[in-house]
Structures are given as C-alpha cells and as structure tokens.
Image: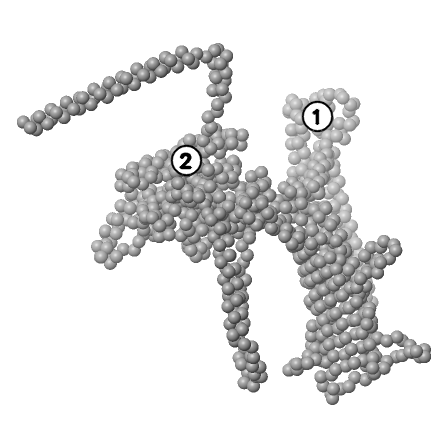
Amino acid sequence: MEVLREKVEEEEAAEREEAAERAEWAEKMERMMKTAEVSKEESILTQDELQDLEKKLTAIEIPTPAEYSIINKALIDVTKLPASYTSNSPKEEHLLQVADNFSRQYSHLCPDRVPLFLHPLNECNVPKFVSTTLRPTLMPYPELYNWDTCAQFVSDFLTMVPLVDPLKPPTHLYSSTTVLKCQKGNCFDFSTLLCSMLIGSGYDAYCVNGYGSLDLCLMDLTREVCPLTIKAKETVQKKEKAMPKKYAVKPPRDLTSKFEQEQEFKRLLEIKNKEEKQRREEEERLLEEEKAKPDPLHGLRVHAWVLVLAGKREVPESFFIDPLTARSYSTKDDHFLGIESLWNHKNYWINMQDCWNCCKDLVFDLGDPVRWEYMLLGTDKPHLSLTEEDDEGLDDDDDVDDLAKEEEEKSFDMPPSWVTQIEITPEEFETRCPNGKKVIQYKKAQLEKWSPYLNSNGLVCRLTIYEDIQCTKVLEVKEWYQNREDMLELKHINKITGLNVDYFKPGHPQALRVHSYKTMLPEMDRVMEFYEMIRVDGLIKREETPMTMTECYQGRSDFLSYRHINFGPRVKKLTQNSAESNPRPMVKITERFFRNPAKPADEDVAERVFLILEERIQLRYHCRDDYITASKREFLRRTEVDSKGNKIIMTPDMCISFEVEPMEHTKKLLYQYETLIQLKNEEKLSRHQAWESELEVLEILKLREEEEEAHTLSISIYDTKRNEKSKEYREAMERVLHEEHLRQVEAQLDYLAPFLAQLPPGEKLTRWQAVRLKDECLSDFKQRLIDKANLIQARFEKETQELQKKQQWYQENQVTLTAEDEDLYLSYCSQAMFRIRILEQRLNRHKELAPLKYLALEEKLYKDPRLVDFVKVFL
C-alpha cells in the first residue's frame, strides 16, 4: 500500500509540474503577441523605406567557402574533363564499398576517434578514394629528381589556401592536374602533388592526415630562421702539440705578482658575469616578445604533410616534409602533434598508436598490424615475423597453402589512378611562382623570389635581413642574379658599414670573381679577387686604399707572389687632368717571390724593396735549409758623376751586404755592378706594371658602371621565344625551305608543254588533236630513248677502239719502253677498262628500263586530265 501511495503521489507531482509549465508557456505566448502588436503599430514603414531596405538586403553577398573558389572556371572547364574525372569504374565503385565497410567497422570499434578521410569529392563532385588520387610521375627535369628540389618547386609554384574548417579535413580533394592549372590549393592538395612526384622519383613517400601546430597549418614562418641566413659551421682543426725538445731553452722565470693576477682575474670575471647577465636578460626579453600566444585549438588543427620512409633512394632515416614550406623535419618534431592515417598509391593505413607525446614515440613499421591497421590485404609492406610457437602450428604445407589461398581471395588490388598524366611545361617550370613573384616572411628576414627574365636586371631572389622582429631597420641585403652577361651572381650589401660585395661566375671579361667596395670612385678602399687560371699574369687578388695597392700572384714564370705599392700625395696641377694623365707618385714598391728551385738559396731573391725617394734597393734572399738567417743586400743609387764631373761606375760603399757564409764565396765589384744595373731595369718595369695596374682598376670600374647601367641579360640559343636572333634565323630558314620547295614543284616540267605550244592559245582541244598530241609525245619520248642508247653505244665503241689502238702501240714498242712508260700504259688500260665496264652497265640498264619508262609515260598520258576524256572515247 505504501508503494502504491508513493507512485500516486509521484504521478500527481508530475501532473502539477506539467500544468505549471503549460501555464508559463501560455503567459510567454501572450506576452510575445502583445509585444508583436505594439512593435507592428510602432514600426509601420513607408513605401520608400521598404524599397531601400529591400535594396540593402539584396546587396548583401553571402561569401562562399574558400575551398570551392580554388577552381578557376576561366582556366578549367569541368565539363570537358576526361571520363575518369566524372564517373567511377566498376572497380572504383567496389573500392568505395570496401572503404565504407571499413569505415563502419572502424567507427564501431573506435567510437571516440574522428571519421576517416577516405573518399572526398573531386572537382566534378564525384567521390574518389584518396589513394587513387595519387598519380606517381617522374618529371622530365633533372632538377626535380631529389626530394628537396621537388618540395621547393611545389612550395614555390602553388599558393596556399587555408582549410574552410581548421578542425576537419576538406570535403573536396582535387586532382594534381587541376591544382597545377589553378596554382593554388590547401595542404592536402600540396601533399598529393608532392607525394606523386616523390613516388615517381623512387622515394617511399606517403600522404599523412594528422594534426599540426598553428604556425605549421597557417604557413607562418615569422618565428623560423631563414635557411639562407644559417652559416655553415667551420671545422676548427686542433693544433698538434709539439713534442718538447730535450735540449730546449728554458723559459725565463715569471716574476709577476700572483696576487695581482688573481685580482685581475676576479675583475675580469665580474665584468664577464655582468655582461653574461645582461645578455641573458636581453635574450629572455626577445624570447618573450617572440613567444607565440596560446592557441585555443592546439592539437585539434588538421594538417596534411608527406612522410618519407628510410630505405629507398638511400634515405638513411625517415623524416617529414611540410609541402607548404618545403622544409624537412624529424619525425619527433614538436610541430607535428598527431597522425590519424596515411596512404600511398597502393594502400591506406590507420594509426593505432597513442599520440599523447605528439609523434615522438610513433613507430613507422607499416607491416605491424598492431600499430598500423591497413585497409587492403594487397600491401607490399612485410608482415611481422612469427614466433616459434606460431611457426610450429604452421609446419604443414597444406595449412600454409590454405592460408595463402584465403588471403588471395580476400585481397583487393588498388585500382589505377583516375588522374591523367601530370605534366609541367618548360614555361611553368621556369616561371615557378604564381605571377612570377613570391614573398616569404621569416624571423627578422624577408625572402623575395622572381622567375628568370621577369626583372630586366636578372634579379631572381632577394634576402633582406632586419635588426628587430618588427622588420623596421635593415641590416643586410643579399640579391641573387641569373642570366647576366657580366656574370654577376650575388650582390651583398651591408647597410651598417656600407660595404658592397659582388660575386661573379667564371666568364667575366676581366676574370673578376669577387669585388668588395664602398664606392665606385677610383683610389678608394676596395678588394678585387680574380680567377687565377684565366688571367695570363696570374693575378688572384688586388687590394686598394687611397695610399696603397697590394697584389697577390700565383703560377707566374718569374715566381712573383706579392707586390705592394705605397703612393705619395698627388702633385696638384693647374689644369684639371684625369688619373691616367696625372698618376699618383710611387714612394715604395715591395715585391716577394716564391722559391725558385733552379737557383741556390743565396742567389734566389725572396723580397725586393724599391725605396724610390731614398734611391735605395733592398734585397733579401731565401733562407737555406736548416738555417735561421738569410743573406741580405742593399744598393745605393747615387748620381752618375761626382763633384769633379768624373763618371761614377761602381764603388764598394754603394753595396752593403750580409752573407750567411762569407767564407764560401765573395761577390766581386763587377757582379755587384751588373746586379745594380739589372735592378734599375727591374725597378722601371715594376713601376710600369704598377701604373698599368692603376689603369686596369680604372678600366674595371668603368666597365662595371656600364654593366650596371645596361644590365644586359644573356639568352640561350635554344630559347626560341626570347632569342630574337635565333627566331629570325629560324624564320629565314623556313622561308628558304619553302621557296626551295616551290622551285622544286616548278622544276617538274610539263611533258605536254612543247606540244601544246604549237596549238593556238586559248583554243580547246579536239579529239583528233588530243590523240595527235599523245602520239607525238610518245614518239618523241621513244626517239629520245633510242638516241640515248645510240649515244651510250657510240661512247662504248669509241673507248673500245682507243683501247685497241693503245694495245697495238704497246705491242709495237714493247722493247723500247721504259719502266715509267709501262706504268703509264698499265694505268691507262686500267682506267679505260673501268670506263668501258661502266658504259656497258649503263647500256644494259638503259635497255631494261627503257620499255618500263615508255609504259609509265603512256599511263600518265592516259590519266592526264587534259587528255583523259578524249583518249577514253578514242579507246
């Protein structure tokens, strides 16, 4: 009874609650009706106001999702695409059914996982399996054979379009051909194209559907360092410690105070710690500025990239490729937060591993069904090896055969790709970037790219490095050039120091390799480096300052390696002269030489100094082996006459020498005089060469100014579109060939022309005239054949008679003939027999072909449009 009472009470309470809810709902409805009536009375609009409101409402455009704006209808007509784009084959339909079944089983077993990305719609709104969208293709360009150049091309060629919903994969996955024509796509389109190219190049590549960081999904590189700014680490070679010698001189005792040393060390340590603290604080401040804001969708943003497994193409370790930026990452990188599935052109795998630690703990063994669940049995990945217990149960051959048959029955091969052949034209490969230009923003740097020949000066890439993160103050600018006639390859501009460095490829008229300068004005600080194997004089480097010039040589026959010229202040003249007519006066010339093994060390000059104003010449010779000092000489250049007017030839005090071994040989006064005369001539030569070097610098500067103003680009002879000379030459050749063809057509003579000329002009042929023309033409041709045969026969008889006469002459004079006459006779006989044999062959061939030619002409006359009607009637 108590239980029934409780049930009744509960039912009554439920009825009271329902009645209260109905009453409350009725009151709300009445209140809404009253407010609606009031608002209707208060908001009565005029006709003009209603029309204005209607115009405003019609002007509102609802934006369509960005995903559907990828296809440009002006470039691609969807209705004209192949049948594989607009429909599915029976095998593809079967594959879609298998995929749906697989998806249902997966959703049932893993209800907490997101739905699989299996068969999105293509550009024709037809569902296509993702593996069949891949079209492995090997590009015909050698530059696209390696993974890095392929990724860079895809990143440069396409424009990134973000996903409509960052939390879900796209509903459409376009073919690579459509993406290439539109030059835009999302991360899945990028990955599909790149994976197709990598598989075609022989890589074990896969498209990956997973989750990435905010910067990775939005292609944000503002917190990444530009790869072009990373300098290669220089390997420092450790110096080998020299073994202490047994009889080495002991170093002097250190008499400095240790207390003072400790105090100085403490002071330096404090300064270092203070600087280190300031540096650390500055780094922390910069890191705080660069630190990204927390992403509320972290770990949920969908992204697609490419996985390259180790093994094929000598890849030592598996790695990721982000197709949006063409950068490679380790499989343990923090930018990649998880993987849902991956696929190639043969199969589809689901990741069954936990991604709590991003992708760092994932094992990419696709043959392991515990870690990776595959969809199709026909996979080329090896299965895990069975244990000994499992092997014992499969010892019988019948069991193995049964299992193989079952797997063969269940296996399903992937249908071929529905995408047509991926093609990249030479123009597209050369243009690369959309509209020929692309800008990428990095951390404290901006990278600009252009296609070749887009800029008139040949600029293809510019890297601007900034001091701050906001990119307001420029530090350096690097510009790369291509196809320049002056062979300029790179220009490096330092905005802080004002230093410009130009780098050249081999082929410059002056063999320039590097040119460093601050201004193009002459006689200023600059450094020029040259290609040593191109210049005849062996110059490899020239440094110039307002008062000095230093040159370095290599590979010269005179073993010159170094020349340093010191200049004095230029003498001012009344008239304004150029640097060529008023050169700087030379004060000192220093020259150094390599060792000449053909000379003794005491006679082989190592350094030569011309002190021009002091009229002295200093010589230092090479040092002998196992010697620590070298011989030296100094010559004084005095006036040629003394105070009394007598001519001075040579005196002992004009040569001051230091000999390492003075007892071996003593140089006589005559030898010193000859050396002095030779040094005077070499001084003149050195001064002349230094003057030529100054003129060459002026010439190079003038040439560089002209090249910068003209900045002419070189065009290959194979580039028929840009090379005007090649284009004109080709058109001229085509015109000549066409004219030659017309001449050949005109050269075919009309066999009836001589006979038609006998008739009155403009008169129509009669039947009798047509038959007469045919007979006359045939009889004339027959007579020509007979005449030709008679001509060949006459020449044959003539050659035979002359040979008989020559043989009769030989029989009569055989006894008196010399050896030379016999040789001449034999030679004549040989030539005569050759001519007779040729004439005999021609005569026989003419007899065989003459009837055939006659019949061929008769057939032509029967088929001639001018005679065909009359001849048929006559026949």
Q: Quadrant of the N terminus?
A: top left
| Amino acid beneath label 2 | Asp
506 or 3, which is in the foreground? 3
Residue 135: image x %, image y %? Answer: 45, 42
In this view of the protein, can residue 304 be seen by the observer? Answer: no
Residue 539: image x %, image y %? Answer: 71, 63
Please identify the residue farthest to the left as the structure is shown.
1
| Amino acid beneath label 1 | Val
775 is higher (above) or lower (below) than 253: above
In this view of the protein, can residue 414 be seen by the observer? Answer: yes
- Mark 2 = which residue? 165
Q: Which residue is drawn at 27% across and 55% down?
A: 386
Q: In which quarter of the image is the C terminus?
A: top right
Tell which tag, 1 or 2, sits nearer the viewer. Answer: 2
311 or 772, which is in the foreground? 311
Please identify the residue farthest to the bottom as the structure is shown.
663
Q: In this view, does 322 lie to the left or right of 861?
A: left
Residue 585: image x %, image y %? Answer: 81, 63
Task: Find the distance from the CA under tag 1 to the CA under tag 2.
Answer: 90 Å
Q: Could you tell which of marks 1 and 2 lies nearer the N-terminus?
A: 2
- Mark 1 = which residue? 771
Q: Residue at x 69, y 39 (%)?
A: 731
Q: Are marks 1 and 2 in contact (CB under 8 Å)?
A: no
Disc 1 secondary structure class: helix
